[in-house]
Image: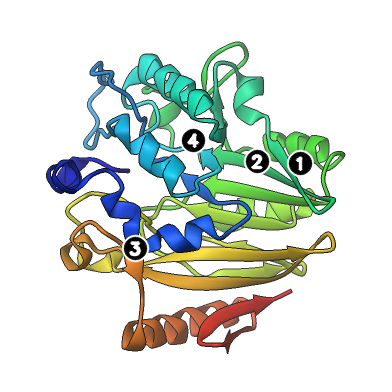
């Protein structure tokens, strides 16, 4: 989310500024995925229901995302309709023009729930994206897509069951990405419920975000669930609990995810001045100790390999 409190420094230094320190790691990947937490639009028509935080990014941000190697945006989140239908449709149009793919939102429910499949060296990898139903985002704010109506994909048992079964016909590895949990809080029971459910219905990997902090990784039925990767570029003033985010680097070979590297980044804007960077030295050691200790309690068995927390699968 390139805007909000960071807008002044971004306009001064350019929209590529927040992504500059992490551009290399994004461009070297075969596929780079982000959660686009707010619409990228000129639209000024804000949601007309009281909402504490309303976000958008300037369209120049899209040029910076493309230049940084972003291939896929997940859109099922609690800000993508902050500027109503007009803002969402404008953003989707700009993504299409920039040749950046998206999942998790659309002009109909079927479009919002439709996944995407990438093929690398004959390995087919499918992605689905949902947001947890936080109540007011459905009935009051009208964020979720329903039959014949625009919006985002809702995280439900039926949607997981049906959509995973459908996409698995066309891919070797199925990855479900969820916007779930509570801000700045520990893993909750709904995350566990839907994470386990996704695996039970056939997902191979589950990855989450929304709490703005990183949470542990778990192994459930021999499959990984990464409950929250925390922030990446998120241009709010920041708070101390938001120091670390995580890049989840999946290494897939021969139709199998061999391992996942958890690369810590410093995202606290009071520290990095709105330009997240890789954690180094003692920062990295602290993250590794804490993340490994907490995740291993959930059966993850993460080890430090070449100074990186690695989950072998």
Q: Residues within 10 Å of mark 4 (few under 14, many from 20)?
A: many
The image shows residue 69 at horizontal and vertical percentages of 50, 48
Q: Earlier in the sequence, mark 4 or mark 3?
A: 3
The image shows residue 118 at horizontal and vertical percentages of 72, 43
Residue identifier under label 4 = 75
Q: Is residue 27 left or right of residue 84?
A: right
Residue identifier under label 3 = 21
Q: Earlier in the sequence, mark 2 or mark 3?
A: 3
- Asked if marks 2 and 1 touch (Cβ < 8 Å), the reply is yes
Q: Nearer the viewer, mark 2 or mark 3?
A: 3
Between 92 and 303, the one nearer to me in the picture: 92
Q: Is residue 229 visible?
A: no
Q: Secondary structure at mark 3?
A: helix
Q: Is residue 11 visible?
A: yes
Q: Secondary structure at mark 2?
A: strand
Q: Nearer the viewer, mark 3 or mark 1?
A: 3
**What label does residue 184 carry, if any?**
none
- Asked if marks 2 and 3 touch (Cβ < 8 Å), the reply is no
Q: Secondary structure at mark 4?
A: loop
Task: Kindly report the distance in space between the C-alpha atoms of the residues bearing marks 3 and 1.
Answer: 35 Å
- Asked if marks 4 and 3 touch (Cβ < 8 Å), the reply is no
Q: Nearer the viewer, mark 2 or mark 1?
A: 2
Task: Kindly report the distance in space between the C-alpha atoms of the residues bearing marks 2 and 4.
Answer: 11 Å
Between 23 and 264, the one nearer to me in the picture: 23
Task: Kindly report the distance in space between the C-alpha atoms of the residues bearing marks 2 and 3.
Answer: 29 Å
**Quadrant including the N terminus:** top left
Q: Residues within 10 Å of mark 2 (few under 14, many from 20)?
A: many
Residue identifier under label 1 = 164
- Asked if marks 1 and 4 touch (Cβ < 8 Å), the reply is no
């Amino acid at each position: 989310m390139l805007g909000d409190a960071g807008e002044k420094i971004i306009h001064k230094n350019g929209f590529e500024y927040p992504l500059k320190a992490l551009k290399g790691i994004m461009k070297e990947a075969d596929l780079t995925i982000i959660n686009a937490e707010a619409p990228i639009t000129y639209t000024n028509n804000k949601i007309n229901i009281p909402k504490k935080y309303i976000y958008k990014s300037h369209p120049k941000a899209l040029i910076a995302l493309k230049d940084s190697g972003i291939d896929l945006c997940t859109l099922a989140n609690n800000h993508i309709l902050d500027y109503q239908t007009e803002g969402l449709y404008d953003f989707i149009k700009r993504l299409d023009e920039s040749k950046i793919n998206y999942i998790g939102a659309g002009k109909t429910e079927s479009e919002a729930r439709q996944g995407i499949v990438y093929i690398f060296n004959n390995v087919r990898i499918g992605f689905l994206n949902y947001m947890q139903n936080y109540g007011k985002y459905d009935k009051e704010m009208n964020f979720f897509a329903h039959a014949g109506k625009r919006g985002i994909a809702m995280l439900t048992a039926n949607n997981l069951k049906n959509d995973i079964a459908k996409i698995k016909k066309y891919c070797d590895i199925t990855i479900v990405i969820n916007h779930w949990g509570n801000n700045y809080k520990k893993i909750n029971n709904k995350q566990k419920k839907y994470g386990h459910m996704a695996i039970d219905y056939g997902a191979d990997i589950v990855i989450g975000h929304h709490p703005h902090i990183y949470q542990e990784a778990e192994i459930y039925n021999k499959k990984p669930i990464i409950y929250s990767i925390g922030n990446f570029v998120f241009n709010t003033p920041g708070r101390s609990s938001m120091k670390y985010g995580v890049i989840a680097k999946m290494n897939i070979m021969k139709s199998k995810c061999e391992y996942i590297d958890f690369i810590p980044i410093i995202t606290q804007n009071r520290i990095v001045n709105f330009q997240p960077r890789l954690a180094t030295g003692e920062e990295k050691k602290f993250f590794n100790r804490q993340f490994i200790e907490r995740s291993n309690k959930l059966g993850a068995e993460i080890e430090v390999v070449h100074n990186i927390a690695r989950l072998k699968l």
